[in-house]
Amino acid sequence: VQSIMSAPSSAQGDIRQVQLKGHSSSVTCLALHNTSTPTSVLLSGSEDGTARLWDLRQQRASLCILMNNDNSSSEITSVSFDPPIVASATPSKKKHTTKTADVPVSSSSLPLQPFAQDYTVWLSSGTSVCGYDLRNATSPIVRDCSVDYTNVFKCEDEVNQISFARSGRRSVFLAAAEDGGVIRVLDTQQQHQQPTPTPNHNHNRSSSSSSSSTPQRQPYRTLYHGDESVMVTSAVFRPPLRRGGNAINTDLVSGGTDCTIHLWDVTRPRKPLSTVQMTQEATGANQVCNPPMVHSLAWSPSGRLVAAGLGDGTCSVLRVTERRTLVPLGRLSGGHDASVACVSFGKLIHNSADNTGSSCHVAAHDRLLVSAGSDGAILLWDLG
């Protein structure tokens, strides 16, 4: 794992590179804990079948999570932290994912740092989606999951990304993007089952359920991004918005190999709110033949912008209007010589020691975009 960090002692914001060693195979996914200031906790997944929790301050792994107890090395396709509580809540109150019976959770006798036990993390591998309450860890190697949603989702194809959203005080949405053109969304706090809506969005599904006279009820909602030949490579929830005093978070953006980006309201899953088709842009001799498939999506901290990493080596930036419509603002080109594998908005940290550095206003965080390409390059873009 290559970690690029801003040196806190430098007023100029110098960047230094730190190498974190632990995985025995390629690293497939990363997640930063989004409530740390500055961020010091990193979660990584690998083709070696493990996920690791890293302490960036000490530059070492604090925990190793084995998702498969049968010693198989199925690739970890996505990792995520439990969503932060955006509404007012008591810190001592347990999260909904931490209910595990007959397991000691006292940290005084554990042979690992209490730092590593402050989190609940989620992993996907193949068609499996599991959560791990790290308060239950009794050794630096975690083998048993706390919550297993595999049989709830019943995913038919490989899960490419999982995404969380906490909406209001009770609802916590979990989305799983699959290879088969669908995103399954589960309300983990919902006590009753929801019917799966009949698809009517720009494709024809040939499924056994279409011949049945009564629709099968499922505990999840299904968003049909495309037909069965489309891989949904990314699905990410929007940062929470304040509506009527509550933090509401039901918007989700998805992208796939059909070169389209959809904006959804997961409570109304029949069709997307808005759709944008990515068009081919020739940015270089190596990119002319590469279609602009969507490899990665990221929301800006304010929730006003969406960035997409595309297969033609460019990044698309879109604005979301008040009516929840996607409006393309432009393409960032000329930086990568291969497909853009990942995009992320950087967080600007105010230096309180000498009162220098960038503003910490939420709009300022929308300026810095980081892109990583299959060409091995990591680029920083100023969108201001």
Image (spheres, rainbow, N blue to C red):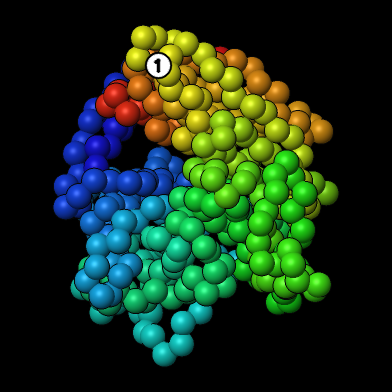
Against 252, residue 174 (above or below) is: below
| Front residue (pair 252, 182) | 182
Residue 129 % position (x, y): 46, 65
Amino acid residing under circle 1 = Gln
Against 158, residue 147 (above or below) is: below
Residue 311 % position (x, y): 44, 27
| Front residue (pair 216, 149) | 216
Residue 8 found in image quarter: top left
Quarter holding the C terminus?
Answer: top right
| Front residue (pair 127, 169) | 127
Q: What residue occupies the far bottom of the structure in this picture?
A: 102
Residue 147 % position (x, y): 47, 74
Against 313, residue 227 (above or below) is: below
- Residue 277 in sight from this viewpoint: yes
- Residue 59 in sight from this viewpoint: no
Residue at image position (29%, 32%) is 4
User: How many numbered discs?
Assistant: 1
Residue at image position (66%, 50%) is 224
| Front residue (pair 50, 225) | 225
- Drawn side of residue 73 relative to residue 180, left or right: left
- Drawn side of residue 198 relative to residue 143, left or right: right
Residue at image position (69%, 61%) is 221
Residue at image position (39%, 60%) is 125
Q: Secondary structure at mark 1?
A: loop
Q: Which residue is mark 1?
A: 287
Against 362, residue 212 (above or below) is: below
Q: Around disc 1, counting alpha carbons within 10 Å, would you say few (fewer than 14), some (14 to 19), or many (20 or more)? A: many
